[in-house]
Amino acid sequence: MIHYHISIENPHRHFISFEAKIPCQGKKTLRLCLASWRPGRYELGNFSKNIKSWNVQDGNVNLAFRKINKDCWEVDCDGCDEITLTYQYYAAELNAGSSYLDTEQLYINPVNCFFYVEDGLDLPYQLKFHLPDDYRMATGLGAISEHVRTAKNFDDLADCPLVASNSLKEITYTSKDVLFHIWIQGDLKIDEERLLKEFLSFSDAHFDIFGSIPCDEYHFLFHFPPYFIRHGVEHHNSTVIAMGPAADFQGESQFKDLLAISCHELFHTWNVKCIRPVEMLPYDFSKENYSRSGYVYEGVTNLLR
Ligand SMILES: [Zn+2]
């Protein structure tokens, strides 16, 4: 298992601090990698440009390492049981696929900033977040407690974004015995009764098409910043949707826009996350994944808006 500690000492500087304890499993060298791209965007992400103060130690002893390409570091770990990786990630961009930290929230897309072992993608993860006690967390990750989360492997981790803050608002509803969470970060004024009715209606409609949903619970993670943005990214048991300005959502067209993008991202739970182009089965995070079937996974999904 890879044990991560995540902390936010100076949130106004936008740097998230990471410490990872990684088992060496008898190897002389380990290759530690960031994903080159993220599902939903399907282009090179260059996430490593946001990495600072990268170091790796055996106890208190620094280990030799070398960067072998844009997002992979090779570490000499001969004779080590476990190594400790530390680094910081600059999280200053808020969209549906990025990571962002300030004094009000921690928002992470793990595919941006968590490392995997090159031939250890199946290793499970435990994540301990060092956050203010009153921070709640919105995410599809497994839970040991509010601030201690788990992922079955890197694929699971990479596909579970999270938002943590003391101002998260949660609304829930149940469609066909499945619990849906609507998490709202931002100062949104909206007709909640109508929102709930519409979400229940389109969720029921998805069950009418597919019969069941391939997850136990589903999370809508909404960012409503005070500036213009329209962006959504799908995941297997959640979606992140960034829409703004937050003050506009009492208007009819913005409300319908919100429903349309929410419906689109939920439909992706089946069309692209489950029914996936064969070129992306499994995901290869080390390089770009080309596909000619965008008109199926985006085009067909768009028809349902
Ligand atoms: Zn889409």
Image: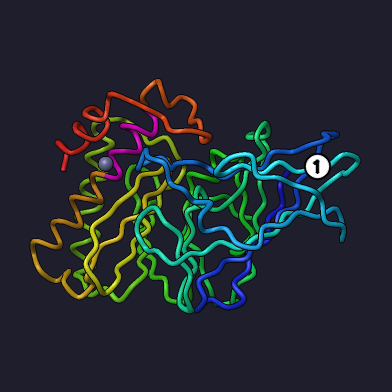
Q: Secondary structure at mark 1?
A: strand
- Colour scheme in the image? rainbow
Task: Name the residue: 54% across, 41% down.
Answer: 156
Direction from residue 102 to residue 29 in the image, left or right? right
Residues packed near mark 1 inside 10 Å, few (<14), some (14 to 19) or many (20 plus): some
| Residue 133 occupies quadrant | bottom right
Q: Nearer the viewer, residue 73 or 59?
A: 73
User: Is 71 part of what is drawn in magenta?
Assistant: no
Quadrant where the N terminus is found in the figure: top right
Residue 180 drawn at (x, y percent): 37, 52
Between residues 24 and 105, which one lies in front from this camera angle? 24
Residue 117: x percent and y percent? 67, 39
Q: Residue at x 35, y 44 (%)?
A: 234
On whether residue 266 falls in the magenta region, the answer is yes
Question: Which of the two residues, 223 or 175, is positioned nearer the viewer here?
Answer: 223
Instruction: State the residue in front, 26 or 258.
Output: 26
Circle 1 sits on which residue? 76
Q: Position of residue 170 (x, y in %)?
A: 39, 66
User: Farthest residue in the top direction?
Assistant: 278
Residue, x 61% and y 42% (percent of image)? 72
Residue 142 drawn above or below residue 242 = above
Q: Quadrant of the C terminus?
A: top left
Q: Which residues are magenta?
A: 265-274
